[in-house]
Amino acid sequence: MDNHSLVLDDTSVTIAEQPLVIGQEFPDVETCRRTLKDIAIAMHFDLRIVKSDRSRFIAKCSKEGCPWRVHVAKCPGVPTFTIRTLQGDHTCEGVRNLHHQQASVGWVARSVESRIRDNPQYKPREILQDIRDQHGVAVSYMQAWRGKERSMAALHGTFEDGYRFLPAYCEQIRKTNPGSIASVGATGQENCFQRLFISYRASIYGFINACRPLLELDRAHLKGKYLGSILCAAAVDADDALFPLAIAVVDTESDENWMWFMSEL
């Protein structure tokens, strides 16, 4: 077996330092699958799952005639799985090109999670180039993009979760910062998000007591899964600096939403 490098979470280790051995345990079958997938990618061979259920996981090398095979079974009375039988030698030449079946969107997401945690602006083109340089695997732009989206969801939650939290968020603003205004509106039978308005007490107090009686309005288009626009109102303070008063997020920029924003102001 060649001593190829296996890269996990930006930490380089060798397969020889972490070999598969009979009796090796995994906390659950999903960890077992992920470990074997990482090894298959690092060793440049395709993995074929023979059987996978609640009590066992059997995989082999996809090349006909290659003896590599592993059988992992659930330990009685506990959630862990252990390697029961293992044939760890390869006689095939493995994957000879840069495309690898095991390099799924889920694998991409796990591979880049630590970097995205440190750098949310990590671009898909940078992801696919880094994966090629570090793992010798080619993934498409769409795989890199979906992998980043999945990793962002794992770290910060999904867009849908964020919208569902808005009513509770507004309630907490009003509760912990009395005098603030925070409201969220929905539309349709499915109660879909329509618009959000927030103005903090400190901004209201500062505008009334220390700013010129003039408001400047602006808007910007939002980027993300559901798009939308952000509307904002700002005053000018004694230092001729912009003083934020209120913001709103709306599903689309329209006369109706602008009139609603002005009425809230």
Image: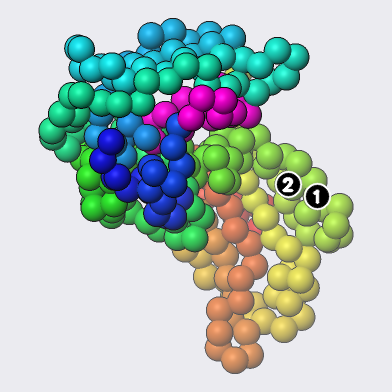
User: Which numbered dot is residue 172?
Assistant: 1
Residue at point 30%, 26% (across, down) = 89
The residue at 71%/70% (across/down) is: 203
- Residues under labels 1 and 2: Cα distance? 5 Å
> Is-magenta flag for residue 41?
no
* Label 1 with label 2: CB-CB less than 8 Å: yes
Q: Which residue is more in the foreground, 215 or 79?
A: 79
- Report the front residue among 28 and 72: 72
Quarter of the image for residue 252 reads: top left
Quick one: which residue is furthest to the bottom in this view? Answer: 239
> Could you tell me which residue is drawn at 63 percent across and 90 percent down?
238
* Quadrant housing residue 187: top right
At mark 1, the secondary structure is helix
Q: Quadrant of the N terminus?
A: top left
204 or 103: which is nearer to us?
103
The answer to whether 256 is drawn above or below residue 130 in the figure is: above
Q: Can residue 93 be seen in this view?
A: yes
**Figure quadrant of residue 142:** top left
Mark 2 sits on what residue?
169
Residue drawn 61% across the image and 76% down it:
243
Inspect the image, locate mark 1, and give the three-letter code of the amino acid beneath it.
Gln
Residue 139: x %, y % from top left: 24, 38
Q: In this view, does 122 lie to the left or right of 137?
A: right
Amino acid type at mark 2: Tyr
SS for dot 2: helix
Highlighted magenta segment, given as a residue range: 21-38
Q: Where is residue 226 in the image (x, y as percent from the top left)?
A: 45, 38
Evaluate whether residue 227 shows in this view: no
Q: Quadrant of the C terminus?
A: bottom right
Compare residues 231 and 90 and report the one nearer the observer. Answer: 90
> Colour scheme used in the picture?
rainbow
Membership of 32 in magenta stretch: yes
